[in-house]
Amino acid sequence: MKNTSLFIYALFMLFFSSMVISAQKYTHQKLTDNVYIMTRHWEGVSISYGVVVGQDGLLLVNCNIASDAHPFEEALRKISDLPVKYVLNNNYDGGNAHLNGYFAHKGAQIISHQALKYSTIFTQNLVDDGYSMEFGGQTISMHHSGGHSFGHMNIRLKQANILFMADSYRSDWLTVFGPKGVDGHIGGLESALTMIDEQTVIVPGNVLPDQLFASRADVMQQIKSTGLFKSLVQKLSAKGLSPEEITEHQEIKSFFKTYYPERLDFDIISRVRNAVNFHVTPDYKATSKELDELLGKYVSNNGKIFEVIVQDGRLIARSEGNYILPLKWTDKNTVINPSGELNEQFEIVRNELGQIRKLKLHFGKSWQRRYVGTTSWSKL
């Protein structure tokens, strides 16, 4: 269990959130006798949660941000006054997990993928792919996606025929691809197809307010369109265009106008850069000696301990209770974060013997600086 300071932080956020709370709006829909979808409507976007009513309590699929605790509970009471017994997390995003500690303090059991121990959220019961349980007449199973983020789980309610995909499938925008790039995102969608049929109700991540649910056909369409996006980026990169030039190219603009016309003001270059990093930029052919030097433990300038390892043939850096990110070695002196929205790089610094002793951070204004540090990682 993580430090209870996370719960105290949640209460701190509650105290300073009256302006946010005043603007909140929840609705809910009954899908079966005891299964509900509760939706939080923000400006221009909606996020849905699952509520299963059991004999003596509730099971939640995800929970909301810390400042939403009281309105979230008030919305739950419109469904049932029973206490929350379980919270299952799709991933570590704020709109899916930041009330974990709050509900755990009230007696709920929190169930998350084991990779979420490398995040700042409160975790409790960590599970791997294929976890299942019975609650409220439902067989509820959690399946590792491989898309969106480390530890993302698609959550299935078998008898109700509902699949909660969170941001492994986001219908309103080209979602964050995750630690394996476009291929990982598509692989996650393809794995979801094996669990659903034409009648399955799919609950996506952030959606347009009038498009709360999706279907098997929608997932199949996103597999096709995302594959097209990857091909376009690869084709334009082969012509020598930079990510910035690709973003402004007519074929890319046409793609987003066709598939995401409601989100044309969103940041397209972050998706282009991600596809280039994962599927165009070549890997540096490091020697076994160089790889051995890179691997190991580092301390960041903000005191966090990171370990760089190879997992499933890929480089990753992770820090328990802090953060996890993919790495890609692109030339002798450069390692990048391929999933980054900016040009997030680590410069390899060697000693006089040529041995790797430090990773110097070049993350600019990236939001990830709050987790990884701002200047350097020193080899331990």
Image: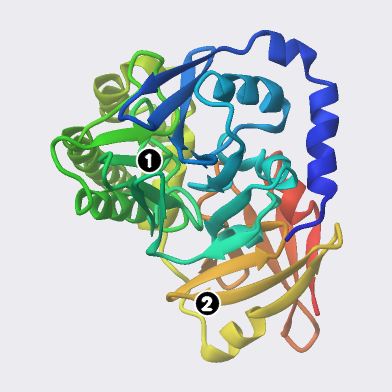
Q: State the quadrant of the C terminus.
A: bottom right
**Mark 1 Cα shell of 10 Å, populated few (<14), some (14-19), many (≥20):** many
The front one of 261 and 52 is: 52
**Image quadrant of residue 376?**
bottom right
The front one of 197 and 37 is: 37
Q: Residue at x 63, y 26 (%)?
A: 73
Label 1, label 2: how many angstroms apart (C-alpha)? 30 Å
User: What residue is pinned by disc 2?
Assistant: 310
Q: Nearer the viewer, mark 1 or mark 2?
A: 1
**Mark 2 Cα shell of 10 Å, populated few (<14), some (14-19), many (≥20):** some
Q: Pick whichever of labels 1 and 2 is earlier in the sequence.
A: 1
Is residue 93 something that shows in the picture?
Answer: no
Under mark 1, the amino acid is Phe
Q: Where residue 217 sits in the image (x, y, percent)? A: 16, 34
Q: Residue at x 49, y 75 (%)?
A: 311
Q: Where residue 371 sits in the image (x, y, percent)? A: 73, 51
Under mark 2, the amino acid is Val
Q: Is residue 377 above or below residue 8?
A: below
User: What residue is pinned by disc 1?
Assistant: 164
